[in-house]
Amino acid sequence: MAGKYDDLARAIVDNVGGRDNITSVAHCITRVRFKLKDESKANKDAIEALPSVIQVIQANGQYQVVVGNIVEDVHAAVLEVSGLADGGAVETDEGQPGEKKTAASVIIDLISGIFQPILGPLAAAGIMKGLLALITFFIPEFANDGLYTLLYTVADGFFYFLPVALAYSAARKFRMNEFTGVAIGVALLYPTMVALTSGEVLGSIDLGVAGTFSWYATALGIPIIMPASGYASSVIPVLLMVWFGSLVERWLKSWMPAAIKMFLVPLCTMTLAIVLGYLVIGPVATLITNLLSAAFSFIFELPIVGSVFGSALVGGLWMCLVIFGFHWSLIPISIMNLNTIGHDYVLAATIAHGFALGAVVFAMYLKNKDEKFRGIALPAMVSAFFFGVTEPAIYGVALPNKRAFVVACLSSAVGGAIVGATGALMFISGGLGVFNWLNFIDETPGGFGVSMMLCAIIASLVAAVLAFVVEFVTYKPGEK
């Protein structure tokens, strides 16, 4: 049975050079992301002229077709009409002849490819956690109800077992057996190992800004160094362990006899990745995590202006990072901050960007009477303002105007500065847009309660009003 977007999908596939030119295809919130063997075979103008296509972007080794909120349907149609495998993978040799990639593009591609599949459940769990925090703030006795306990498993279960989800996603990205990857992630959360950190500390090493490293047991005389909170909700350790496991698995498969490969490859891969993961990779990953956190802390904790400057910088540049896909690099840092220090100030600074952009687009919508433009602008505004999905508004409305995009960025920077000046912090990672406000609720006893959320709301509304007024006054329909 033909699907609603089959014709669009066929046209996209044809104009990226056909099925044979596709290495893989995936999607994020608004973009169908192709990896092409030869991007010169793609017809950008023809694709951008298709209905429902907002823009085409070539960045980080990907050919990205921005289609907005219909991305899941379009991606599914692309897989259907092209006959690609589940997930859009095409069996090919590693890399392409003559292909050159920068270190930045490789890192961004890896991060985005691993985090994209889990963004939906991650946001859903965060929204539930925020809603529960809001309800219990006004109705404290609800925390003792069995329904609260059930709903909290929805809110917190995914975050606790995040290493398992990341292990599966990373295994797919690194082209290793997904369930071998899951076994590595599960090992990080095995109750016996988790319980180690509640026992007696056998020794510690203080590395200053890099943190204090403690061990609670030894293996063959080698300390088993673990974070005080264990590896629950962690990010970098499991990614490095699965990456190492993929190298081991690939090497073993290259020479091991087929008769014993089925069980010996996963046995050796799991054993080496998990044992070395706990003894070496985990501590190194923790060191990297601490150094990244310390670097951002240094900027944000500069005397007098640090928090305001850092927040304004992140808030103002966020939409520029989105254009090139570099915003993915900040998401793991935010999750690490939430896991290690219990709050995050990096992504907190971006709270106003969707509101500023939505307000700019709304001002343009009110002044521009062109029906085609208004048909693009109104849903783009709703998507940015209420759900924090900004690509349709960026590529379809603001960026082509350029000046409007600058107005949105500067207004977002003002919102970020307000976040920095008030010291507002995120306590959970959840939804975007208006749901992002819930991330600022502190549910810890004696904590900030909803005061941080009020600061976030003020920052969002100030940025939105500023962006709307400036754009409404300066925008002239028909300007280039």
Image (spheres, rainbow, N blue to C red):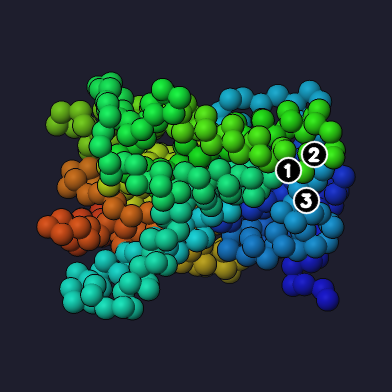
Q: Quadrant of residue 354?
A: bottom left
Q: Regarding mark 3 in the picture, which secondary structure is present there?
A: helix
Label 1 with label 2: CB-CB less than 8 Å: yes
Q: In the image, is 284 to the left or to the right of 7?
A: left
Disc 2 or disc 3, which is closer to the eye? 2
Q: Residue at x 31, y 74 (%)?
A: 148
Residue designated by label 3: 46
Say above or below: 107 vs 442. Answer: above
Q: In the image, is 25 to the left or to the right of 350?
A: right
Q: Residues within 10 Å of mark 1 (few under 14, many from 20)?
A: few
Q: Residue at x 74, y 52 (%)?
A: 88
Mark toward the start of the polypeptide (1 vs 3): 3
Say above or below: 410 vs 461. Answer: above
Q: In the image, is 270 to the left or to the right of 365?
A: right
Q: In the image, is 234 to the left or to the right of 442?
A: right
Q: Is residue 421 visible?
A: yes
Name the residue furthest front: 220
Q: Quadrant of residue 375?
A: bottom right
* Residue 195 at x, y percent in the picture: 34, 47
Residue type at mark 3 is Ala
* Residue 72 at x, y percent in the picture: 64, 62
Residue type at mark 1 is Phe
Residue designated by label 1: 263
Mark toward the start of the polypeptide (2 vs 3): 3
Residue designated by label 2: 260
Say above or below: 296 vs 408. Answer: above
Q: Pick the quarter of the image with the N terminus.
A: bottom right
Q: Residue at x 34, y 37 (%)?
A: 227
* Residue 349 at x, y percent in the picture: 31, 45
Which one is in front, 423 or 395?
423
Label 2 with label 3: CB-CB less than 8 Å: no
